[in-house]
Amino acid sequence: MTKLTLISSAIFSVLCSHSALAATVNGKVTDEKNQPIENATIHVHGKSQSVKTNKLGEFAIELDASGQLHISKDNYSDSRITVTESSNNIAIALKPTSIETVVVFASALHKSSLEMISPVNVLSGDELRNKSKPTLGETLKGLPGVNASYFGPVSSSPIIRGLDGPRVKIMQNGLDSSDASRIGPDHATSSDSLAAEQIEVLRGPSTLLYGSGAIGGVVNVVDNRIPTSNIDELTGAVEYSHDSVSNANTYAAKLETGYNNFNFHFDGTKRSGDDYQTPRFNQLHEDGDVESKDSVENTFIDSETVNFGTSYVGEHLTVGFSYGKIKTDYGIPGHEHDHGHEHDHAADGDAHSDEAHEETPVFAQLEQDRWQGLLSYALHNNWIETINLRLGYTDYLHSEIENGEIGTTFKNKTTEARLNIEHKLADWHGMVGYHYSDYDANGEEAFTPASVTTTNALYLLEEREFGDVTIELGARVEDYKIKSQIATHQHSHDDTQTSNAEVLDYTKSFTNLSASMGAIWQYTPGYSMAMSLSHSERAPLSAELLSNGLHIATGTYELGLGYHIEDGEAHFEPENIKQETSTNIDLGFRRFSGDFGYSVNFFYNDIKNFYFQENTGLVFDEEHGLEAADNGHDHGVAVYQFTSKDAELYGLEFDAHYKVNASTLVKVFGDSTRAKLKQDDENLPRIPANKLGSELQYNLGNWQFALTGTHYFSQTDITAYETKTDGYTLFDAQANYQLDLGNLDTQLYINVDNITDELGFVHSSFIKDTAPLPGRNFRFGIRGYF
């Protein structure tokens, strides 16, 4: 035992060895004209430590071992230099760039947006604040390659390159958001864009680090709820805004402070709004009546979020945790009820009722408690650079209320852990990691039975520079297991009771293998070309595999992959369930120097066993079970079943901008996605329309102006059960005024969305004909920072 202890101590001493003496490294950051750059960030690679340059461009930073300094500043290309304890009076010249460079948190290897092989967009700073909307989907839908599912203004999730739902991972600080937005379009995302420091969108497969569900891409919301840098003084922010289109008011506040390496964070948001207004449109009801409307009923929201976090940031050790609470009531549009009905939201949030009507609309109550933990230790002058552990636990509850009573309750508890060990071996820099996730989902009268999904995965990511070329290799092996109890006796024509149902204990395991290789070539200063090839495997979610029931919010009856329909009954026969397998090729070209810059990406994605919901042509009601849609019954709901067929998706996305002068910038952006089944060349359902847009930015003293126009083309590539969607053009304007109030940084702003009051229907929406986009909206507000 003594010998074992000595050996363990020796190993730990080798791994943790570092210089006991710290040295101060001084330097100066300038531009190409040798003018000082103020507020450039100097960060020691592998540590949380960072400093800012002063007005003269000077900085001083403590270093206790040989390492690398990362220097970054908006509108300049990043610089990385190797330093030792004896380095001093370092001169660093940054080159201007036409593309904003931001360190991408989700890259895991501290890469900037220009160094990433995979296409990436980052919204941060004033750009994020100006474009922030109540939902994640609406905030991001203007980015190239990104659209929104749109189930009304409250529930709108990102669609990346035509893929959404479980194929797009929604992350918060690198951990799964663990809400229900991935399994149903009516479920709102729990990630709050109002409190975010930056939002990162990684287009293309990102399965190596974030799991088999990231075949389409990753959206990572980064906040500072666990501070990773020391905060030396009290800072904060407050904001108020009002939206005229829904009479919505939003209040947000943030406070941060620190003392003696201990740091504290608080943020909170409250938003309330009524049904939103639209340009006048005609809605066709089930009874054949046509109603002219200028609003979408049952689209109210009443939401509150609060978050606390604390951390200790030492020279090598960072440890912290955070707690967040979300409570939201929101209307779910698209349900028939008495005309003229208006919701009456009870003060306690427990009920929505109107005594003048027997029926009330369906609405949702969302509650989430989320705990996150961080433990990071930085070693220096060793082959192991950092050890980073992130932990998360989420308790989520989503109830759908119908006629004043709970119709469906969906709840899940998610435990997640991610351990990353960053290392450097010879000329290779990389990361090895372990990922664990336990997703316990259940509900009362839910259309998906209770299930437990457990994931264990190992992954490896390595990169190496060969002159102007950086190559990246990665692999992941994932053990995916799902457990559930299935009622094998289902509804039939003359038997609507399931009390005598037989229960089957069902367990299914999958081994998902993913691998990728890519390279980026800086073939001339300011230009680069990137190419990647990836292979990803994904097992079905419980909703895709086990669904069997009425989904109140969407008004459909849903069946999973594991069911076979025969003689009006659904039989659970989960045979030959194969993984969804994606092979993706990505090619990108970028220019980021001078006054003109661009990014153009081409992609091709070949997917075997693509899971999607297909209209079966059947309807369901309690009395007759499953029957053909033309059986003469008036009250049945359409039956959609998950199926799998080979598919291919391909397209392009681009953005380009030109800096006309010091105060004027012009942008052009767009994307196009084609998605179809390979066997019979049929189109996939609800694929977003192509878009093309332009933006003009102009600064005049304390004023900032922006005008954006986006044309969404008509979508005629449709399935047999879809209708085509006409094109439309949206014009949005922004005006910000910077107030001079001493130490209080204050902005007044007004945004005018949909200036021309254009009527637009979102093809990717499940309820596109009953929930068009909002009409002209005036949003005005004030934000202040101290």
Image (cartoon, helix red, strand yellow):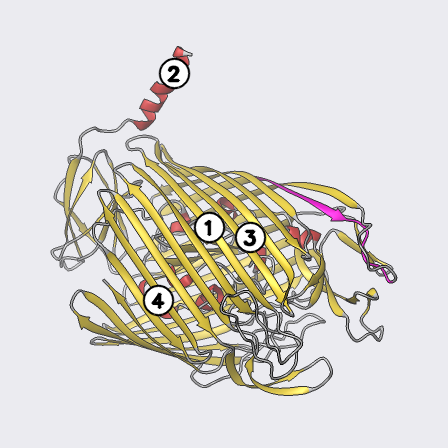
Please tell me whether mark 1 or mark 3 is closer to you in this view: 1
Q: Position of residue 478 (x, y in %)?
A: 57, 40
Position of 15 with respect to 134 (left or right) is: left
Query: Which residue does the numbered mark 3 point to in the structure image?
Result: 215
Q: Marks 4 and 2, how far apart in space?
A: 54 Å
Q: Earlier in the sequence, mark 3 or mark 2?
A: 2
The reply to whether residue 222 is in sight is yes
Q: Position of residue 98 (x, y in %)?
A: 30, 64
Q: Is residue 390 above or below residue 104?
A: above
Task: Check residue 5 in the rendering and tell me which mark sits there, or answer none.
Answer: 2
Quadrant into which the C terminus falls: bottom left
Give, as a single range, the part of the protein colored magenta.
478-493
Q: Marks 4 and 1, how far apart in space?
A: 24 Å
Q: Earlier in the sequence, mark 3 or mark 4?
A: 4
Q: Marks 3 and 4, how far apart in space?
A: 29 Å
Check if residue 573 falls in the magenta segment.
no
Check if residue 486 falls in the magenta segment.
yes
Disc 4 crowd, CA 10 A, few/some/many (<14, 14-19, 20+): some
